[in-house]
Image: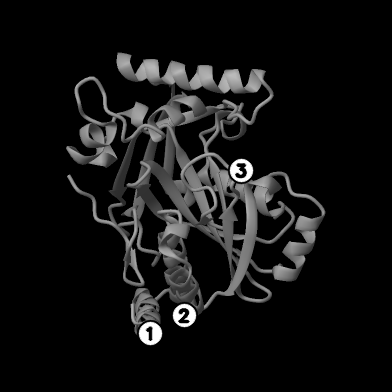
């Protein structure tokens, strides 16, 4: 099954929007994360690839070379979306099991590698069948992505991933802040369920120095699937009512937990024409697959809220997009 790809400013991206259109949020109580503490199991040949990945990273570490360190993550067994009976609100059940970063590298770096059967992982598991239903060992990454707007000066924040960050999105424009689900940080010790909203707040704290004492308007807008790199993602919009560009940049000079993850930030007026114009003006290859979709949904949500919840306000974003396309002959 071929999943449709999100298109904006005449560009088809590598992102499939699995749930959400930006007109209304997915309520925190309607997100159910189920965790099964059982490790993913690779088919024999793929397991050998995984051993090779681990051995190479350990070899580089032993020689004092740059290397990728391993950490406990989650694999996505399935994502199920239903609706409430009366209000038809989205209810999302995310089922997870154990994996680690080397598991993720094993598949993500080898989607085009041929197996003994002559087929690549992409051909066998993502193109000949529905990629949203790929086996859990193909889904060893789930990212929480946040689009940030500053309330005091009304700007959208774009962050460029550092070249030092491993993976296909290094040196690309990405969400304002993002974190992969990690067992060490995100699995509560008191047996409470994992909270995606808590992960989003962690991303804001570790990457942008937005702390618990800062006012925060946080909404989950949807879920996406990166079809190019096969990674699941949650899309959040965060408005910081009391902060502006100047304040955030000053904070970053004083230290940020994960400061190394980004090498450039751009603050763009948060109106649809300016945000979509920025997306259009940056070359297509400089964007991570799902970032444009995230920012588009954030624009839609902002427009709808300004109109008191009227879903038809989404069309103001479409009109702005058309103006950007015509102005640039796209």
Q: Earlier in the sequence, mark 1 or mark 3?
A: 3
- Residue 231 horizontal/vertical position (percent): 40, 42
Sort mark 1 into few (<14), some (14-19) or many (20+) by Cα contacts within 10 Å: some
Q: Quadrant of residue 242?
A: bottom right
The reply, left or right, for residue 212 in relation to residue 304 is right
Quickly name the residue at label 2.
Answer: 273
Give how far apart the Cα atoms at labels 3 and 2 are: 32 Å
Q: Quadrant of residue 309?
A: bottom left
Image point (39%, 86%), residue name: 327
Considering depth in this image, is 22 or 322 the residue closer to the camera? 322
Q: Quadrant of residue 246?
A: bottom right
249 to 311, vertically: above or below: above
- Colouring: one colour
Image point (66%, 76%), residue name: 153
Residue 189 seen from this side:
yes
Of the numbered discs in the image, which one, if any, rests on residue 323? 1
The C terminus - image quarter: bottom left
116 to 119, vertically: above or below: above
Report if the CB atoms under discs 2 and 1 are less than 8 Å apart: yes
Image point (56%, 23%), residue name: 57
């Amino acid at each position: 099954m071929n999943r449709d790809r999100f298109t904006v400013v005449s560009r088809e991206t590598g992102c499939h929007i699995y749930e959400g259109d930006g007109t209304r949020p997915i309520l925190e109580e309607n997100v159910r994360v189920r965790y099964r503490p059982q490790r993913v199991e690779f088919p024999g040949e793929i397991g050998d690839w995984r051993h090779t990945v681990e051995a190479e990273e350990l070899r580089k570490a032993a020689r004092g070379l740059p290397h990728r360190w391993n950490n406990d993550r989650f694999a996505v067994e399935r994502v199920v979306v239903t609706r409430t009976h009366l209000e038809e609100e989205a209810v999302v059940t995310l089922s997870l099991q154990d994996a680690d970063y080397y598991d993720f590298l094993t598949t993500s770096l080898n989607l085009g590698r041929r197996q003994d059967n002559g087929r690549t992982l992409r051909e066998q598991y993502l193109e000949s069948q529905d990629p949203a239903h790929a086996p859990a060992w193909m889904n060893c990454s789930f990212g929480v992505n946040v689009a940030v707007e500053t309330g005091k000066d009304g700007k959208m924040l774009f962050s460029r991933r550092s070249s030092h960050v491993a993976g296909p999105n290094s040196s690309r424009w990405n969400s304002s802040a993002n974190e992969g689900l990690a067992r060490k940080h995100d699995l509560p010790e008191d047996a409470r369920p994992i909270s995606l909203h808590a992960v989003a707040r962690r991303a804001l704290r570790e990457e942008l120095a937005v702390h618990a004492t800062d006012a925060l308007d946080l909404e989950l807008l949807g879920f996406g699937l990166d079809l190019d790199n096969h990674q699941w993602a949650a899309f959040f919009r965060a408005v910081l009512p009391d902060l502006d560009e100047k304040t955030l940049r000053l904070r970053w000079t004083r230290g940020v937990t994960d400061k190394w993850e980004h090498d450039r930030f751009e603050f763009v007026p948060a109106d649809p024409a300016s945000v979509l114009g920025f997306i259009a003006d940056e070359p297509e290859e400089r964007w991570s697959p799902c970032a444009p979709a995230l920012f588009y949904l954030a624009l839609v949500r902002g427009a709808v809220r300004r109109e008191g919840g009227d879903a038809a306000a989404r069309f103001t974003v479409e009109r702005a997009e058309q103006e950007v396309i015509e102005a640039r002959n796209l």
